[in-house]
């Protein structure tokens, strides 16, 4: 959701990338991309009706909006403090939903240790990396690179599990997707190291999302909203001392109204609401259809960035996005009429 959240962008806002329905994401986020999942048993793929499409497009706007809100809030807030605001506000909303639904809260230390790991892999590390990267690159480019999360998830699942091995079709899709990354980076030349560091940070965030997606398989029987609340709680507790030591937020100037609104949008819309909407779509349309949001998030982020932030993209970024999208389409398989894996 963060990104996108997947983004997510959202818990580990995960995507269905395996032969069986699975769950990512966050922000991806955001994102969005898991070979495993942290929600109960998935439903089989169902037809997408108008309501499902509207929900899916809305989710892509929420997760794509996380990059937009970040760009605005970074004017007044440093990365760690901004991420702390995002996860702490989302934590309060998610726990309110947990209590409203009267979901039992586990007391098992293993559960809390697990959500602490998820909080680090799915919130702390990727959120901070993506937000920092946006101090150097546009929100549009960050969203495009974040779309590689499913590629990393597949590779990690192939290495770390016995049941999620790459097929020929998915291998080809992964290779095409990373070919798009190469197009975006271009041919390195002298003096480009600093310029490549921020895009590399987004790719590292996508890798972290992928790790979270595979690790999150152990929460398959836990109510998703409970896992989300636990994750954001853990990441808030880990971020608090970092923000105090590094950013010293009491020395920061009073945020402007636009920054405050961006932070609220970041936390309430692109995180808490996006988590809730994500699971509603998952229940209504199934995990395979939910993968489609991976294609829509960069588009939403680009429209917001170009339309409201006056961002521009280089031709190689557009071409790279198309190539990454082609790789994801091959992985998804529905647009590939002839089976190759």
Image (cartoon, grey):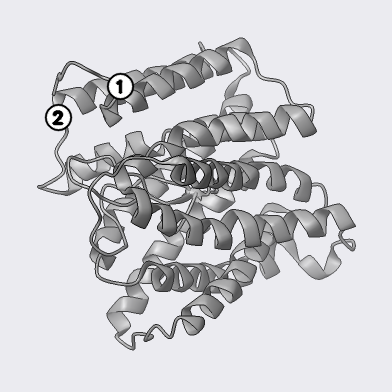
In the foreground, 136 or 99 = 99
Instruction: Say which residue label 2 marks.
Output: 167
Q: Quadrant of residue 254?
A: bottom right
Q: Quadrant of residue 86?
A: bottom right
Q: Is residue 289 left or right of residue 196?
A: left
Q: Is residue 191 visible?
A: yes
Q: Does the rendering let one see residue 28?
A: no
The image position of residue 43, as x and y in percent, is 25, 54
Label 1 sits on residue? 335
x%, y% of residue 227? 39, 70
Q: Position of residue 66 (x, y in %)?
A: 63, 47
Above or below, comparing residue 107 to residue 306 in the picture? below
Residue at the outermost front position: 50
The kind of secondary structure element at disc 2 is loop
Give x and y (percent) for residue 58.
57, 45
Q: Which mark is residue 100?
A: none
* Quadrant hosting residue 91: bottom right
Q: Is residue 124 left or right of residue 174?
A: right
């Amino acid at each position: 959701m963060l990104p996108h959240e997947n983004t997510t962008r959202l818990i580990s806002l995960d995507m269905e990338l395996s032969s069986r329905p699975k769950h990512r994401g966050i922000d991806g986020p955001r994102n969005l991309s898991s070979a495993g999942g942290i929600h109960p048993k998935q439903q089989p793929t169902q037809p997408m009706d108008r309501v499902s499409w509207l929900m899916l497009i809305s989710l892509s706007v929420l997760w794509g909006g996380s990059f937009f809100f970040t760009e605005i809030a970074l004017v007044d807030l440093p990365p760690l403090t901004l991420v702390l605001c995002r996860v702490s506000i989302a934590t309060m909303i998610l726990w309110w939903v947990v209590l409203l639904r009267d979901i039992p809260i586990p007391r098992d230390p293993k559960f809390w240790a697990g959500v602490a790991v998820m909080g680090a892999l799915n919130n702390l590390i990727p959120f901070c990396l993506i937000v920092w990267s946006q101090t150097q690159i546009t929100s549009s480019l960050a969203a495009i690179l974040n779309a590689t999360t499913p590629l990393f998830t597949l590779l990690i699942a192939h290495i770390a599990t016995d049941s999620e091995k790459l097929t020929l079709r998915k291998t080809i899709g992964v290779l095409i997707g990373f070919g798009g990354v190469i197009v975006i980076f271009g041919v390195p030349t002298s003096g480009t190291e600093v310029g490549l560091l921020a895009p590399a940070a987004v790719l590292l965030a996508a890798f972290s999302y992928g790790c979270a997606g595979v690790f999150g398989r152990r929460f398959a029987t836990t109510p998703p909203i409970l896992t989300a609340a636990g994750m954001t709680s853990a990441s808030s507790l880990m971020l608090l001392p970092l923000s105090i030591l590094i950013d010293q937020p009491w020395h920061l100037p009073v945020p402007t109204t636009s920054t405050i609104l961006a932070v609220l949008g970041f936390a309430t819309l692109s995180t808490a609401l996006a988590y809730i909407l994500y699971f509603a779509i998952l229940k209504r349309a199934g995990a395979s259809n939910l993968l489609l949001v991976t294609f829509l998030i960069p588009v939403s982020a680009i429209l917001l960035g170009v339309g409201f932030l006056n961002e521009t993209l280089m031709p190689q970024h557009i071409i790279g996005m198309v190539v990454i999208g082609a790789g994801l389409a091959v992985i998804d398989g529905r647009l590939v009429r002839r089976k190759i894996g």
